[in-house]
Image: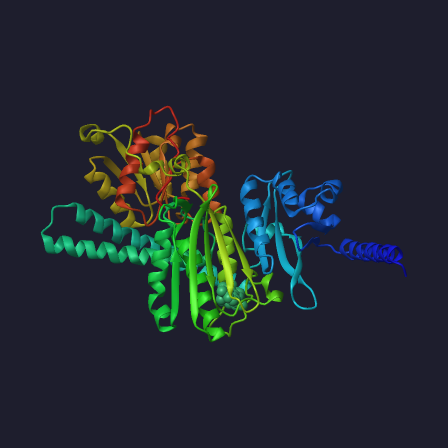
Amino acid sequence: MNSRNKSHSLRIGEELLQAQLEAVAESSDTGVVLFDGAGCVQLANRRFGELAGLEREEITGCVSWEELARKMAAHMDAPEEFIGRWRARMRRSGEASWDEIRVDRPAPHRIERFGRPVRNAAGDPIGRLENYREIAPESQTDMRGLQTEKLAGLGQLISGIAHELNNPLTSITGYAQLMISRPLPAPQSADAQRIFQEAERASHIVKNLLLFARDRRPEKRAVDLNEVIDRTLALRNYELRVGNIAVEANLDRDLPLVLADPVQVQQVLLNLVINAEQAIEQSGKEGIIRIRDFRSGDRVHLEISDSGSGIPLENLGRIFDPFFTTKPAGVGTGLGLSLAQQILREHGGQISVESGAGRGAKFTIELPIAGQQKIEQLFPLHEPARVRILPRARQRRRVLVIEDEPTVASLIEDVLAEEGYTAETHLDGREGLDRALHEEFDLVICDLKMPHVDGRTIYHELVRHHSPLQNRMVFVTGDVLASRTMEFLESSGLPYLAKPFQVDDLKAAVARALSEPASEPVAHFRGAARS
Ligand code: ADP
């Protein structure tokens, strides 16, 4: 065969192969994109186009990954982030990876992307194959759809106990704070301080329990991620030393604050660090965990990589599934990463992973930066009240307290008395409503969950009777984690305090609610435990 014939038949062979490849790709209900070693698009199937929101011509016209990424990014709110992430991925194209992509337009949806190197017979990477799958809407919102009955039952039990504990904890922390604020002899003041601190600790445990019960909104505030990393490492200090695991932290000390729930973020980090420790232990080799954080655009990135056993290719797309674990019973539950993913989604962030066989794993989390404006929108409670009410004027202010838990009711009454207000308390919602409808008050502080007549009903009755008090309510609730409660509070637009609340938050809430002109609705502000 002469050389012209040879190249001709080679071309025909290539065309045949390409057609066969395309036929295979088209038959898949997964989006498929194949890149060559230089990052050029070799093939992309129709399903990929549907998921990415791209027309067939747009894809076939793409020659490089970058062009493709730019076209996809045009449908996203944070295009540069997405392209940057892809670039990092292509730089390490010899590794398998998993990440989640959020497409915002035309219809918002999430896609998971699973990438792996394509290798020749000698094992050298010659390209990259990416699979794209839509994430079902139910798993986009939360784990409810995936939660087993067992977990749901356990969650209910935990949630019930935790809510029961909130009332006594509110009283203990509240009275301890009242004692601390009074001029007491030093030993008593120190004792009160200790009671307060320990009750705070118990409150934290309750919050952590509720975190597992999951029907909860994150308590977001501006958080220094470096501090959370330091705290997490301090918690694992002993285990890391005993396990002979070195930690190399490369933290950007000028990192901007992130808008996050510090407890949840710590839970995510703790899980990643423990997983890294366990992977190192499993590999039986000397271990190192590398932690790096940096800013990219309006996001903060945190990478945790380890020198452990790595994640086999076939598991990479499954490790975020609830209950997926490769660890023995008693060691692994398979919930850590799925909770981490859930938490990050709730924060508008995300988690992704890369792993090369035998080369450890690298998890990257992203969180949005807390812009000053956003913080103020969310936490105006901590601003000083704009109008100060003078104590003398306060005596004329009448506050109706409706709370069925006697100790919490008397705590609120005592705080109000200390602040100079005149308070009237009712433990029964029916009596409280009756008073609210027939007497003059300046403010109602009302528990949401009560027998007979609850806070919701009281509010609706005040609205029905066109009572001006409908705009002068502060709710108290131990149930802020339930989505039904949140929906009500959000729709009424009224302020609330989450049990166990701080005495200062109660004072601020009352002062703020009363400093508004009577005819206008009370400014919407959030309690301490509000996201
Ligand atoms: P659990 O740790 O209880 O198994 P996770 O959801 O945290 O649950 O992790 C799921 C699985 O992901 C683990 O069982 C393990 O197989 C894998 N995995 C997670 N992190 C790592 C890591 N750093 N290195 C290797 N494998 C990991």
Q: Position of residue 395 (x, y in %)?
A: 20, 31
Q: Is residue 480 above or below residue 6?
A: above
Q: Quadrant of the N terminus?
A: bottom right
Rendered view: 269 above or below 44: below
Colour setup of the view: rainbow
Q: Which quadrant, please, contains the C terminus?
A: top left
Q: Is residue 179 visible?
A: yes
Which residue is at 24% across, 39% downward?
Answer: 416
Say if 20 sits above or below 445 in the image. Answer: below
Visible in this render: residue 165? no
| Position in image of residue 368 (x %, y %) | 46, 44
Residue 70, x across and y down, in percent? 62, 41
**Number of callouts:** 0
Question: Left or right: where does residue 288 sit relative to residue 42?
Answer: left
- Name the foreground residue: 153 vs 348: 348
Towards the viewer: 516 or 99: 99
Say whether residue 49 is left or right of residue 375: right
Where residue 456 sits, quadrant-wise, is: top left
Q: Nearer the viewer, residue 97 or 502?
A: 97
Q: As drawn, is 313 to the left or to the right of 494?
A: right
| Residue extending furthest toward the left | 185
Name the residue furthest front.
2
Question: x, y (%) of residue 302?
Answer: 45, 53
Work out whether 150 lies above or below 222. Answer: below
